[in-house]
Amino acid sequence: MYDVVLNQFGDFSEEKFNTESKIRRAANDVMFYVAQAVGSTTKDATEYDWSNARKNLLSLQSMYIFASKRFIEIEPSVVTRIDKLIKQVDQEIKKTKQEISDKTKKDLEPWLEKYKLWKEMSEEKPKSSKKKRRT
């Protein structure tokens, strides 16, 4: 689809500039989000940052491959490195999700214990033996 649309309009130096610019921005965004994720102390935010890093890695990879069809000569090792980074980021996302799940369970333990006690106490209460009278 990309080539079909570009062939209809011919070569534009502006299109080449925009594509290269998007590739540079995506690479910068990857570095930014990875740095945010590594530096984050809040696990909930870390999952978001790793997800953004993954999204930008996929954008970078897609734009790089598309640009190779028209504007630049592709370096296969770049695509391979991006694939490896995506796998590492996926591992970090999985690890972060597990840490969040563990933290949630730990945070809920006192509340579940209180609920369990309340439930036991409410079951031990004697039921009212008064019957309703009809008038």
Image: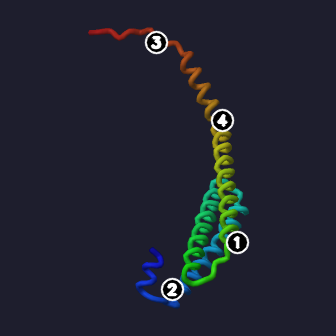
Which residue is denoted by mark 4 in the rendering? 109
Give the CA distance from mark 1 to mark 3. 78 Å
Q: Can you give x and y, in whole percent of width and height, for residue 98 in the image?
A: 66, 46
* Residue toward you, 111 or 51: 51
- Front disc: 4 or 3: 4
- Residue at position x 69%, y 55% in the image: 92
- Front disc: 1 or 3: 1
Q: Residues within 10 Å of mark 3 (few under 14, many from 20)?
A: few
Q: Earlier in the sequence, mark 4 or mark 3?
A: 4
Q: Earlier in the sequence, mark 1 or mark 3?
A: 1
- Front disc: 1 or 4: 1
Three-letter code for the amino acid on which mark 4 is drawn:
Glu
Mark number, residue 15: 2
Q: Earlier in the sequence, mark 2 or mark 3?
A: 2
- Residue at position x 47%, y 78% in the image: 3
Give the CA distance from mark 4 to mark 2. 57 Å
Instruction: Give the left or right position of residue 81, taking residue 1 as reference.
Output: right
Three-letter code for the amino acid on which mark 2 is drawn:
Glu
Quarter of image, res 85: bottom right
Give the CA distance from mark 1 to mark 2. 25 Å
Q: Residues within 10 Å of mark 2 (few under 14, many from 20)?
A: few
Quarter of image, res 118: top right
- Residue at position x 26%, y 9% in the image: 135
Three-letter code for the amino acid on which mark 3 is drawn:
Ser
Label 4, secondary structure: give it.
helix
Three-letter code for the amino acid on which mark 1 is drawn:
Ser
* Residue toward you, 87 or 51: 87
Which residue is denoted by mark 1 in the rendering? 77
Give the CA distance from mark 4 to mark 3. 33 Å
Label 1, secondary structure: give it.
helix
Q: Are marks 1 and 2 in contact (CB under 8 Å)?
A: no
Which residue is denoted by mark 3 in the rendering? 128
